[in-house]
Image (cartoon, rainbow, N blue to C red):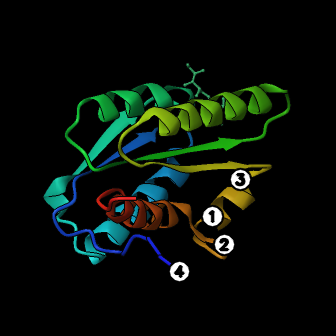
Amino acid sequence: MNLIEGNINGAGKKVAIVASRFNEFINAKLIDGARDCLVRHGAADNDITLIRVPGAFEVPFAAAKAVDAKKFDAVICIGTVIRGDTSHYEFLSAEVTKGVAALAMRAAIPVVYGLVTTENLEQAIERAGSKAGNRGWDAAMTALEMMDLNSKKI
Ligand code: INI
């Protein structure tokens, strides 16, 4: 069997993190997790660029700009959408997810989905560095593997 897979090595890699400010209490932890993961796996802190946007809805737009800049080896999308009393959550989380997915399909570099979409604040906290890990760290780990895979001929 011929196996092609990416290794986890961030040395020399340039990564854009696109992160929304809405629910910043959670997003700050996700950004920290992503940055920590990249640096612990060899990426230079100077090679990480943080792009901030107001809310999750704006993430796909800024992520597309980062892809089109052709300066990065991967783009990590971060944001937090928490269910409220109305249907707003469904519409927003679906559109953001579709936006990131559409970009991921057309981009020549990995675009990673690091958004947290939860029923309540407690679930978001659990995914931002407590009992369910840190989705920002997980997204960065995915970016590391996919950047290396992207450098290989398939
Ligand atoms: N943005 C979020 O990132 N998370 C949310 O939970 C949220 N809610 O619930 O409203 C949210 N709204 C703002 C939205 O992303 C846009 O910034 C706004 O609609 C302007 O386009």
Q: Residue at x 57, y 29 (%)?
A: 99
Which dot, 4 or 2, sits closer to the camera? 4
Q: Quadrant of residue 50?
A: top left
Q: CA distance from mark 2 to mark 1?
A: 5 Å
40 displayed left or right of 102: left
Mark 3 Cα within 10 Å, few/some/many (few <14, many 20+)?
some
Closest to the observer, 77 or 132? 77
- Whether disc 1's CB lies below 8 Å from ligand 1 is answered no
Residue holding disc 2: 132
Residue 109 in the image: x percent, y percent? 36, 45
Q: Residue at x 63, y 37 (%)?
A: 97
Residue 60 in the image: x percent, y percent? 49, 30
Q: CA distance from mark 1 to mark 4?
A: 37 Å
Q: Amino acid at mark 2?
A: Ala
Q: Is residue 6 above or below residue 73?
A: below
Q: Residue at x 36, y 40 (%)?
A: 108
Residue holding disc 1: 127
Residue holding disc 4: 1
Query: Mark 1 and mark 2 in contact (Cβ < 8 Å)?
Result: yes
96 displayed left or right of 11: right
Q: CA distance from mark 3 to mark 2?
A: 13 Å
Which dot, 4 or 3, sits closer to the camera? 4
Residue holding disc 3: 121
SS under mark 3? helix
Mark 2 Cα within 10 Å, few/some/many (few <14, many 20+)?
few
Q: Residue at x 16, y 63 (%)?
A: 12
Q: Amino acid at mark 3?
A: Leu
Going from the N terminus, do you reach mark 4 or mark 2 first? 4
116 displayed left or right of 107: right
75 displayed left or right of 83: left
Q: CA distance from mark 1 to mark 3?
A: 10 Å
